[in-house]
Every structure is written in structure tokens, then in C-alpha cells.
């Protein structure tokens, strides 16, 4: 090849390489970094409760994160990365909806937007995530439950209420997802605010989450008590959660999970 032709060929190849790199960077740019959301959680969440007044006064980073969720491209992501993404999306969108309506005593008091069925409120309100339109209900039931079949998500997603599992003070991550979900399950199941255990033959007094989504836990462990045993210290589990234990469910407190 003549020198001039070699130079032209190299220039064309280099330009193509830059174009490909630019396209890759552009694609990566719409994948929302969790750093802004991490700052929101670190600043306004403590012991699972939210400083909604403070967050409403400085809602910019949360709003920016929600906008970036709308254009995220999850194509080719690993299972763990997708689960972490959808948990974070659910929690961030819930925060954004409460902040938008604050002050409010309960997420159930937020009036639905025009065209949304009464009684479902924010859970049926359309939201933009990953290039499409969905709802909080669909994220929970059609994506996290149906697509991934991971019962521990019930201890990670937060519905902004006192009886909900505490909101984590950091985002969920693909790298640490299994340990993070285990920690969420242990923390929720072992916390007497949500689940109460007494010496048999007293029944287990469990969160209504175990009633509403009982099939998820039965599918995973054979029964609700068997699932609960997984996340209690072994000695406590053997003593307080025997095979065939009776189960009752605690009232659910929908008041706002506010600091």
C-alpha cells in the first residue's frame, strides 16, 4: 500500500474508533450513576426514617436522579445489576412522590393524578423508567417479583410507611446485592417492630407482608415459618419458630416513615 493510502486508511480507522468510543460513552452516560442518590440517602435517611422536610428543601439531586432513571438503558445488564436498579428506582420514585406532596401524613393520602384509579394512588401513577412508562405497582409485581422471583426484594423496597421495611441509607449495588438483600431480610425479620416471636405454643406475630406475599415465601422455602427461620440466629430460630408454628399478622401502620 502506498504511504498516502496507508495514512488515509489509518485516519478512517481512527475516526471509526473514536465514533464507536463516543457511542459507547453516550450509551454509558444514560445509565444513572447512583452517586447522587447515594448522597440523598446518606443525608436524609437515618435508622430507616426520612427527613422529608429537609429533602423537600433540597430536592434537586433526587429529581435529577429520577430524570436519569427515565433514560437508563439496561440492555445486557446482569441479573444482579437489574435487580439493584429496579429496587433503587422503586425507592427513589417513592421518595420523589412523597416529597412532591409533602407535608402529608401518609402515602395513602396522596391524591391520584387525573385518570388514575382511586384507592391505588401513587402506585398506579405512570412513571418513566428505562426508556418506557410503568408504575410502582408494575415495578414491584411485574418486574421484581415476576421476572426475578427474588422474595428478599420485599425487605428492600420501601413504601414510605412505618410498617414498611426500613429504607436503606445507601443504594443497592450489583456487586454486593446478595449480602445486601440478606442483611435487609435479617434486619426486618429480627426487628420486633415488624415481627414478634414468643415461646411456643404462642403464634408467630408477623408483618402483613408475609400474608400479602405468602406465596413468594412458600415457593422459596416451603412455608412462611421455614422462610423466617432462615434469617434468625439458629438457636433463636429452633426455639421460637418450630415446624408447624401458627402464624398471625400484625396491623400495618401506613403513617409516614418520617424522622
Image: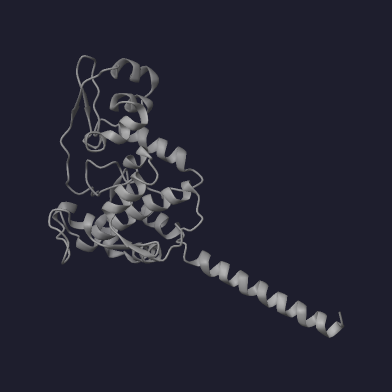
Going by the image, does 147 lie left or right of 176?
Answer: left
Foreground: 256 or 224? 224
Residue 13: percent from left, percent from top: 72, 75
Residue at the (15%, 58%) spot, across then down: 117
Going by the image, does 53 lie left or right of 62?
Answer: left
Residue at the (23%, 57%) spot, across then down: 98
Going by the image, does 40 lie left or right of 120?
Answer: right
Q: Please say which color scheme the image uses.
A: one colour
Residue 172: percent from left, percent from top: 42, 48
Quarter assignment of residue 216: top left
Foreground: 74 or 59? 74
Residue 201 visible, this orientation: yes
Residue 106 visible, this orientation: no
Quarter assignment of residue 230: top left
Residue 167: percent from left, percent from top: 32, 46
Going by the image, does 171 lie left or right of 108?
Answer: right
* Total count of labels: 0
Establish if 235 lies above or below 120: above
Residue found at the very far right of the displayed protein: 2
Foreground: 233 or 47? 233
Residue found at the very far bottom of the displayed protein: 4
Residue at the (66%, 75%) spot, across then down: 16
Residue at the (23%, 14%) spot, across then down: 200
Residue found at the very far front of the displayed protein: 1
Quarter assignment of residue 92: bottom left
Establish if 71 lies above or below 249: below
- The N terminus is located in which quarter? bottom right
Amino acid at each position: 500500500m502506498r504511504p498516502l493510502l496507508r495514512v488515509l486508511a489509518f485516519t478512517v480507522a481512527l475516526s471509526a474508533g473514536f465514533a464507536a468510543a463516543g457511542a459507547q460513552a453516550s450509551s454509558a452516560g444514560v445509565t444513572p450513576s447512583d452517586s447522587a442518590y447515594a448522597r440523598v440517602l446518606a443525608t436524609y435517611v437515618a435508622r430507616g426514617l426520612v427527613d422529608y422536610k429537609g429533602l423537600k428543601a433540597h430536592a434537586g439531586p433526587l429529581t435529577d436522579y429520577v430524570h436519569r432513571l427515565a433514560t437508563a438503558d439496561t440492555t445486557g445488564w446482569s441479573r444482579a445489576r437489574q435487580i439493584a436498579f429496579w429496587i433503587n428506582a422503586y425507592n427513589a420514585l417513592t421518595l420523589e412522590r412523597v416529597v412532591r406532596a409533602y407535608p402529608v401524613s401518609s402515602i395513602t393520602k396522596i391524591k391520584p393524578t387525573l385518570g388514575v384509579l382511586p384507592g391505588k394512588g401513587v402506585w398506579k401513577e405512570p412513571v418513566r423508567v428505562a426508556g418506557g412508562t410503568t408504575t410502582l405497582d408494575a415495578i414491584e409485581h411485574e418486574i421484581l417479583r415476576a421476572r426475578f422471583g427474588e422474595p428478599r426484594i420485599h425487605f428492600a423496597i420501601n413504601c414510605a410507611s412505618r410498617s414498611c421495611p426500613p429504607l436503606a441509607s445507601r443504594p443497592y449495588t450489583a456487586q454486593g446485592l446478595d449480602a445486601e438483600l440478606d442483611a435487609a431480610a435479617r434486619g426486618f425479620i429480627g426487628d420486633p417492630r415488624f415481627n414478634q416471636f414468643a415461646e411456643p405454643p404462642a403464634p408467630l406475630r408477623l408483618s402483613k407482608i408475609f400474608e400479602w406475599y405468602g406465596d413468594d415465601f412458600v415457593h422459596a422455602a416451603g412455608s412462611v415459618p421455614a422462610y423466617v427461620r432462615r434469617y434468625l440466629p439458629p438457636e433463636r430460630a429452633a426455639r421460637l419458630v418450630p415446624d408447624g408454628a401458627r402464624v398471625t399478622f400484625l396491623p400495618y401502620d401506613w403513617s409516614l416513615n418520617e424522622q
